[in-house]
Image (cartoon, helix red, strand yellow):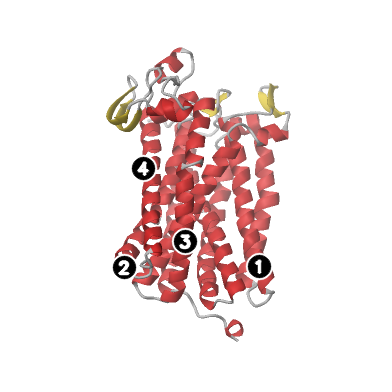
Amino acid sequence: MQLDPMTLSRIQFGLTVGFHFLFPPITIGLAWILVILEYLGWKRNDDEYRRAGIFFGRLLGLTFAVGVATGIVMEFQFGTNWAEYSRFVGDIFGAPLAAEAVFAFFLESSFLGLYLFGRNRVSKKLHWISILMVAIGSTLSAFWIIVANSWQQTPAGYVLQNNRAELTSFFEAVFNPSTVIRYSHTMVAAMIAGAFFAAGISAWLLYKNKESNVARKSLTVAVVMGFIFSVMSLLPTGHVHTIKVWETQPEKFAAMEGVVETSTNVPLIAIGIPSNDPPEVKPIIELPGMTSFLLGGTTDTEVEGIKDLEAAGYPTPPLGITFFSYHWMVILGLLFIGSMGLGILLLIMKKLDTARWYHMILPWLIPLPLLACELGWIVAEVGRQPWVVYRILKTEDAYSFNVSGGEVLTSIIMFSLIYLLLGTVYVFLLVRKVKAGPAPLPAKEVE
């Protein structure tokens, strides 16, 4: 049987990026939660907030370590499996990746060491600044990665020369048409992931009655943060991002929303069944004219459909996976608002600490923001197909032609086994640390 190296390279890249992308959202969101917990502990001289900081700081260190290990593998693939892509966009793609390493990763990793090992060795102010720098560093790191990916979605600041894209304006390339809104939406998603991570673990501690004072305070911070950013994931960032996709990538938008025919008064298909050949979506629940209205403020807004885009020479992405991924992401976003809104209601009613049924539910929700992040990434990447750089370079022209299918398959098996081991170790250590609960304060800090 002939092994297709391009298809296998895509599978491998999807596997490595998908696994890696489980950890940065937790790292970013949890780092900012720790900024709040440590600040409250410092300013209020509150031992429970300090203990919460120590507890979640250890979970942050564990998550950061696994994220770094998986991220290194991901970047090497540009040279091994996607040599033609690297040759074509290296002049542009290399700059944000270098900036991420120099300006963000070293900031994040250096201050993480100071934060984890500097307690009682440096002043409380400097210790708080260290976790603030970790949060800023992780946020900047994500910015440069989003810059590189956004350029693939909406390329700008370049010229095609010598059969490659050459940089003409660093500023235009960095702030291409989709960078700011994609970065905003991704950061909001990371905050949600961190909030649900902290809320779920805090709720479990409360349910087991382990250090309830510490868990009570961390749960409150996580629920408030989770609710704020869950709302922001819908409005404004989700809505504005969808409009930007409609403006800059009509093929992706048509697949996301299941728009087959170009028309006005386009309905919003809340639930539907798509089919690829021929492209068709059978609506089960739809809101008449709502897609047009949400995009342009009027039902007279025209939306291009898949058939007309194909006829005009613009190939469209796979309909089924793009449609389902987008809709499930939206459904999860609504679930996040509802679950954290319920927590806010319990907080107002002064029942958040005692609602054991709510404490029992929250731990099961921890993986869902990560699933939503993965679905969003699928929409972004599959929705761009068949292009690896939108309307410039096709995926079929970007892989390494001199790498055989057997070699790629071997590396897929190897990476799968390594990631299975890493994932197992991470979950084992995470569960063990959570079961141990918050540790007592160091003796010096108690004094």
Q: What numbered label is drawn on residue 114?
A: 1
Label 4 is placed on what type of residue? Ile
Question: Dot 3, how many residues are within 10 Å of its Cα: few (below 14), some (14-19), or many (20+)?
Answer: many
Which quadrant of the rendered structure holds the N terminus? top left
Q: Do we see residue 20 in this rendering?
A: no
Q: What numbered label is drawn on residue 331?
A: 4
Nearest to N terminus: mark 3 or mark 4: 3
The alpha-carbon separation of the residues under discs 2 and 4 comes to 26 Å
The alpha-carbon separation of the residues under discs 3 and 4 comes to 21 Å
User: Circle 4 sits in a helix, a strand or a loop, which is it?
Assistant: helix
The alpha-carbon separation of the residues under discs 3 and 2 comes to 17 Å
Residue on which the image places disc 2: 356
On the image, the x and y values in percent for residue 437 come to 44, 74
On the image, the x and y values in percent for residue 122 come to 69, 74
Nearest to N terminus: mark 1 or mark 2: 1
For the residues bearing labels 3 and 1, Cβ distance under 8 angstroms:
no
Nearest to N terminus: mark 4 or mark 1: 1
Q: Nearer the viewer, residue 425 or 435?
A: 435
> Which label lies toward us, 1 or 2?
2
Question: Dot 1, how many residues are within 10 Å of its Cα: few (below 14), some (14-19), or many (20+)?
Answer: some
Label 1 is placed on what type of residue? Leu
User: Circle 2 sits in a helix, a strand or a loop, which is it?
Assistant: helix
Residue plotted at (45% across, 65% down):
220
